[in-house]
């Protein structure tokens, strides 16, 4: 069915003028206000992706995993919105309080490094803000409105990326504040040992609840992806909310990957904090809605975690070509490769003639779009190696 004019979260029509200004259409930013629109699935179904059929079924527990079902946007109003907000906040607080008591890792206190056979991640990062400040980091590891963290704990290596929703800037809010604070809070919880490696959703839940309880008002929205390597079990546990994500590459092939979560085109699942008058209007998902996976990893596996600025501009085959340059787990080599990937994505984002993954997805949704998608880009590149203290 040919969709009618759709609205991005920034409130601009994304219909009739796309054919006349395809490059400008690709530059539209998502904003905080929920709009009506058709619900669409991820750009690529799991079975269509490299390693998809098997990887899509391997999740925590046993049996096949059902793909995440996008929820249709819904507007709440008046007393119903207020009651919904109070009940949702109460449940989050209770869950986070219980999580804070139960998720302190019993292995956190005392002692030295990991035992024999433990795994760790050697990780390097690189990114570009959409405003061309190449490689410039704000406080809290931010590239533009993106944010990231890498934290080492004796039980696990944990890393994450978040993409602040740029449309908040239209309302006088700095989008990087929300994503940056979320990632810094996640990092602190990991370093304090207040987490369970097999439950990355718990890290997101507790962090988000802390933001809700912040005495200083913090407004904004963000996607988030958390990746945890449990040293002793050699298992990777992930939680992805929205359209940031990760790839696991082994032997030159993608063996695991995250699934995008979209409400409708260019409108990913996201954590949000809105002013009281906007409750029920601003799009806000629960951390529990994050897509969770758990699987074994091997020494030498490559894990690439990134915001959508990478995946919207570079298809898998281009990423795999760049990863071939990675010959060992030396940090300098990983850093060079991470920068090479980020640089190529940044260049493609501003190529008006390039048929990017984002443009292909837009065409699949009946929009006449061509070119890259100018966006902030954050890349965390990791290799699974023997753990050293």
Image (cartoon, rainbow, N blue to C red):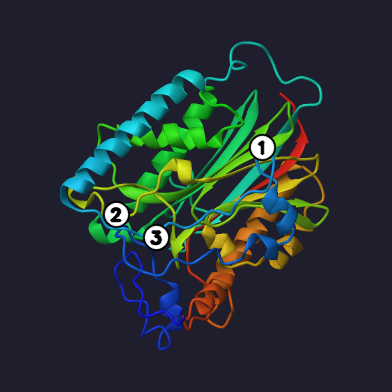
| In the image, residue 14 above or below residue 289 | below
Query: Which residue bears the numbered disc 3?
Result: 72
In space, the residues marked 2 and 1 are separated at their CA atoms by 34 Å
How dense is the environment of label 1, judged by Cα within 10 Å: few (below 14), some, or many (20 and up)? few
**SS of the residue at dot 3?**
loop
Contact, mark 2 vs mark 3 (Cβ under 8 Å): no
Q: CA distance from mark 1 to mark 3?
A: 28 Å
In the shown orientation, is residue 71 left or right of residue 283? right
State the residue lying farthest toward the front.
Answer: 63
Q: Is residue 246 above or below residue 183?
A: below
Total marks drawn? Answer: 3
* Secondary structure category for the residue under label 2: loop
Query: Residue 231 versus residue 132: which sits nearer the camera?
Result: 231
Q: Position of residue 138 (x, y in %)?
A: 43, 46
Q: Position of residue 69 (x, y in %)?
A: 50, 56
Can residue 249 be seen here? The reply is yes
Nearer the observer: mark 2 or 1; the answer is 1
Q: Position of residue 94 (x, y in %)?
A: 36, 27
Q: 36 left or right of 49? A: left
Q: Which residue is mark 1?
A: 61
Q: Which residue was labeled with disc 2?
A: 282
Q: Earlier in the sequence, mark 2 or mark 1?
A: 1
Q: Residue 303: image x %, image y %?
A: 69, 47
Q: Earlier in the sequence, mark 1 or mark 3?
A: 1
The mark closer to the camera, 2 or 3, is: 3
- Alpha carbon separation for disc pair 2 and 3: 14 Å
């Amino acid at each position: 069915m040919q969709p009618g004019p759709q609205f991005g979260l920034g409130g601009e029509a994304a219909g009739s003028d796309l054919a006349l200004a395809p490059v400008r259409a690709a530059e539209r930013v998502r904003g905080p206000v929920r709009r009506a629109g058709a619900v669409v699935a991820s750009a690529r179904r799991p079975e269509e992706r490299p390693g998809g059929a098997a990887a899509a079924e391997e999740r925590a527990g046993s049996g096949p995993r059902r793909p995440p079902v996008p929820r249709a946007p819904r507007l709440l109003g008046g007393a119903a919105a207020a009651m919904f907000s109070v009940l949702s906040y109460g449940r989050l607080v209770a869950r986070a309080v219980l999580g804070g008591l139960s998720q302190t890792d019993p292995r956190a206190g005392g002692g030295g490094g990991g035992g024999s056979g433990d795994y760790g991640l050697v990780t390097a990062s690189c990114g570009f803000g959409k405003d061309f400040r190449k490689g410039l980091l704000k406080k809290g590891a931010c590239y533009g409105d993106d944010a990231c963290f890498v934290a080492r704990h004796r039980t696990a290596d944990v890393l994450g990326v978040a993409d602040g929703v740029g449309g908040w800037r239209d309302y006088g809010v700095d989008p990087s504040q929300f994503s940056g604070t979320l990632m810094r809070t996640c990092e602190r919880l990991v370093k304090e040992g207040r987490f369970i490696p097999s439950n990355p959703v718990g890290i997101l839940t507790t962090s988000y609840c802390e933001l809700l309880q912040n005495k200083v008002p913090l407004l904004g929205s963000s996607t988030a992806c958390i990746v945890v390597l449990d040293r002793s079990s050699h298992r990777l546990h992930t939680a992805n909310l929205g359209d940031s994500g990760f790839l696991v590459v082994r032997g030159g092939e993608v063996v695991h990957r995250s699934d995008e979560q979209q409400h409708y085109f260019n409108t990913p699942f996201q954590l949000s904090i809105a002013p009281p008058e906007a409750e029920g209007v601003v799009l806000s998902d629960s951390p529990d809605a994050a897509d969770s996976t758990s699987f074994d990893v091997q020494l030498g596996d490559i894990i690439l975690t990134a915001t959508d600025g990478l995946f919207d501009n570079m298809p898998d085959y281009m990423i795999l070509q760049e990863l071939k340059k990675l010959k060992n787990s030396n940090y300098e080599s990983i850093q060079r490769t991470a920068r090479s990937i980020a640089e190529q994505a940044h260049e493609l984002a501003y190529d008006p003639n390039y048929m990017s993954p984002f443009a292909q997805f837009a065409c699949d949704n009946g929009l006449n779009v061509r070119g890259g998608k100018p966006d902030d880009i954050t890349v965390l590149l990791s290799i699974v190696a023997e753990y050293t203290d």
